Image (cartoon, grey):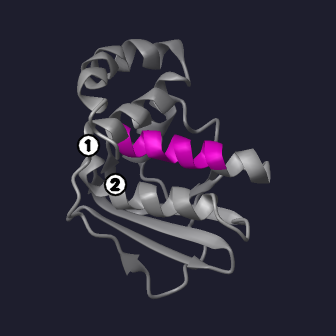
């Protein structure tokens, strides 16, 4: 299955759908769009990520989920919602410690159609990958051990990378 992210914003709600194996390469436009919207007015009332068609997610995508949740919670006091998780995705989110931060729903709510397909033209730079992993490292000492070598390697190249 192809790696694809979709997005739609309506009625101050942000809807995201992940399809296939989501890796860092799919993340730059999603990060920019969601962070820009979370920082804008009127305030976002809900962020829902449908993972029912997501077969796998890498640590960069999981770090973005943590970043989205942190920024959304800052002004709403509520966590983002993840819905329709496969057994594989649930296991990944539990291992990294994300399930305790977000709301997990069995089935995704009805999404407004049509969703906009995000481009994958921009490749993930070292800065995006570094910041996503720093979000994960903050969650636990185990994540610190898991990702510290990657963080240290990325720090050298991320200085010139501004994504």
Mark 2 surroundings within 10 Å by alpha-carbon count, few (fewer than 14), some (14 through 19), many (20 or more): many
Identify the disc placed on residue 28: 2
Q: Is residue 64 magenta?
A: yes
Q: Is residue 156 left or right of residue 90?
A: left
Could you say which is closer to the camera, residue 155 or residue 150?
155
Could you say which is closer to the camera, residue 48 or residue 33?
33
Identify the disc placed on residue 65: none
Q: CA distance from mark 2 to mark 1?
A: 8 Å
* Percent of width and height locating residue 96: 47, 29
**In contact (CB < 8 Å): disc 2 and disc 1:** yes
* Percent of width and height locating residue 7: 45, 72
Which residue position holds label 1? 125
Q: In which quadrant of the rendered image does the N terminus lie?
A: bottom left
Asked where in the image residue 133 lies, by quadrant, the reply is top left
Question: Which span of residues is magenta-colored?
Answer: 59-71
The numbered mark, 2 or 1, whose residue comes first in the sequence reads 2
State the residue at coordinates (33%, 37%): 127
Identity of the residue furthest to the front in this view: 160
Q: Is residue 70 magenta?
A: yes
- Is 161 rendered above or below residue 50? above
Q: Main secondary structure of the magenta part?
A: helix
């Amino acid at each position: 299955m192809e790696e694809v992210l979709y997005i739609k914003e309506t009625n101050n709600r942000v809807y995201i759908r992940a399809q296939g194996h989501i890796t860092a390469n799919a993340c730059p436009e999603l990060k920019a769009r969601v962070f820009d919207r979370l920082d804008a007015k009127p305030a976002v009332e809900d962020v829902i990520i449908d993972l029912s068609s997501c077969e796998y997610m890498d640590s960069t995508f999981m770090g973005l989920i943590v970043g989205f949740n942190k920024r959304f919670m800052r002004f709403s006091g509520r966590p983002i919602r993840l819905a329709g998780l496969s057994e594989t995705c649930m296991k990944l989110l539990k291992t990294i410690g994300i399930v305790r931060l977000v709301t997990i729903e069995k089935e995704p709510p009805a999404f407004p159609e049509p969703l906009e397909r995000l481009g994958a033209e921009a490749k993930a730079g070292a800065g995006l990958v570094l910041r996503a992993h720093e979000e994960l490292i903050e969650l636990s000492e185990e994540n610190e051990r898991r990702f510290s070598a990657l963080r240290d390697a990325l720090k050298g190249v991320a200085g010139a990378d501004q994504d």
